[in-house]
Structure formats: structure tokens, C-alpha cells
Amino acid sequence: MATFYMKLTNTERLDFQPGKNTFIVLRKEMINGKRKTKKVEIPELKKINELLNSGFLPLHEAKKQIKVLVNQLQETEREKNKPSSTVFLGNKKLVEKYLDTEYSHRDLIDPQSIKNDFYRAINILGNNISLLTSSQTEIQKQVNKELKAQRNKQRRTVNRLNTLLKFANRGFKLQRFKEEFVEPNHVSEKELIDSLDKSDINDSIKLIIKLGFYTGCRFAEIFALKETDIWEGFIQITYQKDRLGKIRQTKTRKKRKAIISKVAKRVLGEWFSLPIEVKNKLYEVRYGAILTNLLGRRFVFHDLRHSYARHLCNNDISLKHVADSLGNSILVCEKYYAGWISEDEVLTNVAARLDKV
């Protein structure tokens, strides 16, 4: 089934300029194991862009209307592809009952997105596999078959199905494929700083990229930081700021202390001096495209978090402290970062410390 998402062109600009920024909606679909993306042309989208660029419609209101439009397109696509058997309808009722029980009282950013997530998960089960009556083997076999060409989606889908199975008291869990280990993307401090120095990117954007590298914060966590969170040698990370401007708990819902250097403290000082209006605009920037162009390879903002971990590892920081700084378990850090510890770099750093003694 195809999925739809919106994109604002010219997002490298911090100053929104009517006539130069336009929303587009893209339709993404897997065909024969290959991803196909196509631009959607519809009258409603054209009308919203016209109002936006004429100044009659504020940017935040245009985003809301585009989001409603995307949800409508997704709903139409789902109805078109939806199986209609009693088995599928039983799975759908289970989803609705779960959402009503577990989510109706929660303050959600985007309830429709969560609903869509669960519907996508049960869609792969088709007409004949029931979460209420089918055996573990039958469900697992169907999941493996459907997700074979879409391994990047298996984690979310399997997690959603396991949530429903637990809610239905089935007493078993589905397993994901044994994934091949893929080394996380990263950039060294020298490469990043050299690339930023040569670039004509807006200084505020450069600042937030440096923050991602030197603090290991997730993107939304940066916008919830306060000056009182800075301590000698570390920063306290407690909250994150969502797209609607609400301050929420972090992804793991736990506080953590992240190791920071003197350079990081200086960068944080510059961040806190920025006006709130500039920070709000920085939240809307698409950093994946900027970082990819900057480094000449695919790179997203979260990869700066991996780079922070490598930076700590190569400065002789133990995996336990790396794990604590990231808010991850030691097992996760061993899996992803243990192989990054360069003996030559560690020995050089140890020698430099001994020279200071």
C-alpha cells in the first residue's frame, strides 16, 4: 500500500519567503521490492499553496491543512486496498478497542498517525490471518512473507502486532528477522568542522548541527534545554519539545546526564543566546538534506548522535559512560559502538593525558 507525506521546498532558508516556498505531497510505494516516489498533483494542494504564497494563509495554518489533506489521501488509499473479510474486520475491531482503551485519555500530538500505524500493521495479515484465533506459526509466517522486501519497516510493524497480541492475551510474541549488522553512519569532528567552515549555511543552522555532535541530544531534546541544565562536565537532559511546542518527557521517559566538553559548553552558550523566534524557525528546517549536501553522502540529524558516541569512545570514555550519556543500555552500545574504539586513537589520548601529569 502506498504512503503519503508532505514536504516544504526551500527549507534551507530560515526566513520564509512567500512565492519561494511551496508545499508538495509525495506518494511512496514499494513495487517489486523497489521504492517508487511520485509527486501528487491535486487542486486542494494548489489552492493551499496559492493562499500561502499570497500571504493570506500563515505557514503554521498551511501545514495543518496539508496534514489533514495527507491523512485524507492515506485514508482513501487504505479503503482502496483494505481487505473486507470477517477476519480482517475482527483485527480492525481489536485495533479500535485497543486505541479506545489505551490512548483515548492521552494527550497525543497526532492521534491519526498512531491509528494509521496500527492499520498498516494489520493490513499485512490480509484476509485469512486473525490476531485473535490464528496460531503463532501462521501469523509469523505471514509477517515474514510480507516484510521480506521491507526490512526497514519490520521493527515498527512487529512491535505494533505484538502490542495487539499482548492486549488480546494471546501469550506469545512475534520475532523479527535476524538483521545483518549495519554500522551506524558517523562523521569525525575534523570532517564536520572543516565542512561547516567551508559552507555558506546559515550560522544558526551550523550551531544546531554542532550541538547535535557535541551533546548527543536527539533533535527535539535540544529545544527543551535550559541554561540551568549545564553542570561541570555534563548536561542534564530531562525533556524534549514536540512539533506543537509542548514540553514532554524524553523518548525513554528517563533523565540522563550527558558528558560534554568545554567546546560543547561554548556552543551551548551561543544556543541559549539565540532569540526564541530564530529557534522556532530552526525547528522547521530539514537537516537531512542539508547534512547530506554538506558531507557528500546520505546523513541525517540522528547520525550526529552516533558521531557523538564515537567521539567519546575515541577519547577513552568507557562504554558504560557512553551508554549513560546516550540513555541507552550497555548491550546496545556494545553492539553499535564497541567496534569503533580505535586503539591508536585511544593510546594517543592516554599518552597525552600522561604527559600532563
Image (tube, rainbow, N blue to C red):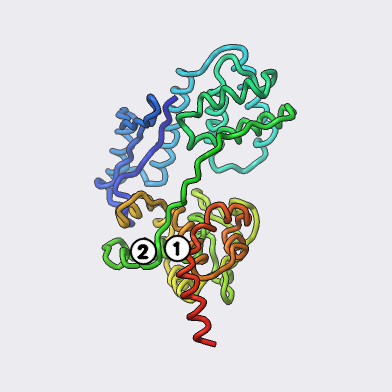
Q: Is residue 215 above or below residue 83?
A: below
Q: Measuring 72% from the left and 27% from the top, which residue is drawn there?
A: 168
Neighbour class for label 2 at 10 Å: few (<14), some, many (≥20)? some
Residue 164 found in image quarter: top right
Q: Measuring 44% from the left and 23% from the top, which residue is drawn there?
A: 77
Read off the residue under disc 2.
192
> What label does residue 69 carry, if any?
none
* Residue lying at the far bottom of the rendered structure: 357
Q: Position of residue 173 (x, y in %)?
A: 67, 32
| Viewer-side residue, 53 vs 252 | 252
* Quadrant of image for the N terminus: top left
Helix, strand or loop under label 1:
helix
Dot 2 amino acid type? Leu
Whether pointer 2 and pointer 1 mark residues with C-beta atoms closer than 8 Å, the reply is: yes
Q: Position of residue 110 (x, y in %)?
A: 53, 39
Q: Is residue 290 above or below residue 136?
A: below
Q: Position of residue 336 (x, y in %)?
A: 53, 53
Q: Measuring 58% from the left and 55% from the top, which residue is drawn there?
A: 334
Read off the residue under disc 1.
213
Q: Measuring 53% from the left and 83% from the top, which residue is drawn there?
A: 354
- Is residue 9 left or right of 77 when viewed as pictured? left
Q: Position of residue 144 (x, y in %)?
A: 55, 27
Q: CA distance from mark 2 to mark 1?
A: 9 Å
Helix, strand or loop under label 2:
helix
